[in-house]
């Protein structure tokens, strides 16, 4: 038994049950009761912290009335909206788990996640009604309650579903009478990320992770109660929810401005109109903001910084953004499992642009050797010469639970001795600035979404006229990367148009995962063990793109 030099009883009892995310939000509901917490430009409405708390309580009581209990899952497939925030906070008030999922998923992918987490309640956006109805028909699990959010007020809920406004109508606005609904180790949130074969993996996040992720943002921006943030990315991502999204902003006492759809002109207009202090988004978004600001400039003097994530920030782009948008550019690199783990601050730029930065204050990063038959130990590192390539690993004890839900094998493969083996390849220098050079699993990042070639290839190969295929990413100004499919025909009559139509209608392939380019070839490069050489195909794709050899659809 542990021996202490002092009586730890009260500290342990208080810390374990009071150091929770929802308590942080609740503090703001009385100390900042009349301050703006959430603004929706489309609805032309602002909720104060007191008003937001009342809305959250209405949903919490609706969930309680439906029998939602501790550790039950409340799943929501929503675009950025006030209801997204309600769904994030309300389950935490009653000890349940909030679970946002990607609204861009196909029906089959959505059904898979439903069966994996078995939500008691499913909340979805009217914009994706057809997808959700198909998913519900495909899933084995059926939520006890299905709720549709319609911000326009013009849609009717399908039979057996209920509108969100009706679901929370006349429910109590008082805090639920549940004393200490959560412990610091309780799962508060569950995010989904793709696995190495494209199967989504549930990432559990506990109160310690939630609170210290918020602290991390407050420390690195830095963020304070006077700030107004607008994350241009979808909130269901960890980068969307946690990087200047609802999680840190509502914990610190700032104001979240909702951007439902990304549009560079609208973003800049909102930034000026609402005096946004921090904008957050991927580098391709910043390129579009830069171009729009040059054509139709707005007043960005209130902007304290722009935080990018999801892709490296090139030096030339960084300089342009600093001149046109704000001198304070930040760039974060990380994962769904552990949020961001390395960071570039304004004083690092533009000199270190192109790298992923140094490890965050509470984190560590290393680049370890790669072996064909085993995993390198955390101390088996490559030279700090920015030349020798290895696998990037991170240690982030404050921001990860070091496991996946229902995935013991995958957990053992990724989490080891307190480190996360991300699967990205890179180098590092004497000051431990990491530079990413590729992906161990050949993952493609398009419009901020992680896409695994294996999943797309499997679907292409199911087509009766396809003998074999390989999928890689190529440079794309709008998406960062776009998917190109190299295909060997099994039937000479196969056309790119036919394949595009097939992919568009496939129930297990989300729209953002569809190939945008096609090229028919006679053979593919393989290793001696029969594995596709994605890196060789990627090199070929770069040259083919330059020569205009792709069929675009």
Image (cartoon, helix red, strand yellow):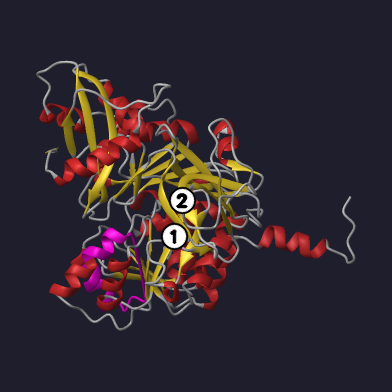
Name, please, the residue furthest toward the bottom.
301
**Tags 2 and 1 in contact by the CB under 8 Å rule?**
yes
Viewer-proximal residue among 549 and 448: 549
Seen in the image, is 269 located left or right of residue 250? left
Q: Which residue is mark 2?
A: 426
- Element type where label 1 sits in the image: loop
Q: Residue 53: in sight, yes or no?
A: no
Residue 263, image x, y percentages: 21, 61
Q: Earlier in the sequence, mark 2 or mark 1?
A: 1
Is 383 above or below relative to 354?
A: above
Residue 82, image x, y percentages: 36, 60
Residue stretch rendered in magenta on the structure: 266-288
Seen in the image, is 51 located left or right of residue 543? right
- Name the residue located 27 percent from the left edge and 61 percent from the top edge: 285
Residue 160, image x, y percentages: 33, 35
Q: Which residue is mark 1?
A: 356
- Magenta: main secondary structure: helix
Viewer-proximal residue among 151 and 389: 389
Crowding near pointer 2: few (<14 within 10 Å), some, many (20+)? many
Residue 105, image x, y percentages: 32, 39
- Element type where label 2 sits in the image: strand
Quadrant position of the C terminus in the picture: top left
């Amino acid at each position: 038994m542990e021996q202490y030099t002092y009586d730890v009883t009260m500290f342990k009892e208080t810390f374990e049950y009071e150091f929770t995310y929802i308590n942080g939000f609740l503090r703001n509901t009385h100390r900042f009761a009349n301050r703006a917490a959430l603004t929706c430009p489309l609805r032309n409405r602002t909720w104060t912290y007191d008003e937001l708390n009342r809305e959250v309580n209405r949903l919490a009581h609706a969930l309680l009335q439906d029998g939602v209990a501790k550790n039950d899952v409340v799943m929501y497939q929503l675009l950025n909206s006030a209801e997204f925030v309600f769904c994030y906070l309300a389950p935490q008030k009653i000890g349940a788990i909030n679970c946002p999922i990607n609204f861009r998923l196909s029906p089959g992918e959505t059904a898979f996640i439903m069966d994996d987490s078995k939500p008691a309640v499913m909340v979805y956006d009217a914009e994706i009604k057809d997808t959700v109805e198909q998913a519900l028909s495909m899933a084995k699990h059926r939520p006890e309650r299905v709720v549709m959010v319609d911000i326009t007020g013009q849609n009717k809920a399908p039979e057996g579903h209920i509108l969100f406004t009706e679901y929370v109508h006349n429910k109590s606005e008082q805090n639920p009478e549940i004393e200490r609904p959560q412990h610091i180790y309780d799962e508060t949130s569950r995010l989904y990320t793709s696995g190495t074969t494209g199967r989504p993996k549930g990432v559990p996040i506990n109160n310690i992770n939630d609170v210290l992720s918020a602290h991390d943002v407050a420390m690195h921006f830095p963020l304070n109660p006077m700030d107004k943030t607008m994350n241009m990315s979808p909130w269901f991502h960890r980068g969307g929810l946690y990087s200047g999204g609802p999680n840190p902003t509502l914990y610190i006492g700032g104001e979240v401005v909702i951007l439902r759809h990304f549009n560079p002109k609208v973003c800049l207009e909102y930034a000026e109109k609402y005096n946004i202090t921090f904008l957050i988004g991927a580098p391709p978004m910043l390129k579009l903001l830069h171009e729009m600001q040059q054509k139709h400039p707005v007043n960005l003097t209130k902007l304290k910084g722009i935080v990018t994530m999801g892709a490296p920030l090139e030096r030339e782009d960084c300089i342009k953004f600093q001149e046109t948008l704000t001198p304070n550019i930040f760039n974060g690199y990380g994962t769904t499992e552990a949020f961001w783990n390395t960071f570039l601050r304004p004083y690092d730029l533009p000199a270190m642009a192109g790298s992923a930065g140094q490890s965050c204050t509470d984190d560590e990063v290393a680049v370890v050797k790669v072996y064909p038959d085993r995993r390198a130990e955390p101390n088996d590192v490559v030279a700090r010469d920015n030349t020798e390539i290895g696998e990037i690993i991170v240690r982030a004890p404050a921001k990860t639970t070091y496991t996946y839900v229902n995935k013991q094998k995958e957990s053992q493969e990724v989490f080891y001795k307190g480190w996360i083996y991300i699967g990205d390849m890179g180098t590092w220098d004497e000051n431990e600035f990491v530079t990413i050079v590729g992906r161990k699993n050949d993952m493609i990042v398009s419009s901020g979404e992680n896409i695994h070639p294996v999943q797309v290839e499997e679907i292409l190969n199911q087509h009766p006229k396809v003998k074999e295929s390989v999928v890689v990413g190529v440079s794309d100004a709008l998406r960062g990367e776009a998917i190109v499919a190299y295909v060997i025909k099994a039937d000479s009559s196969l056309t790119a148009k036919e394949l595009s139509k097939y992919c568009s209608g496939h129930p297990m392939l989300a729209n953002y995962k569809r190939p945008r380019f096609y090229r028919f070839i006679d053979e593919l490069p393989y290793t001696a063990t029969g594995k596709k050489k994605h890196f060789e195909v990627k090199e070929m794709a770069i040259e083919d793109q330059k020569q205009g050899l792709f069929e675009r659809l």
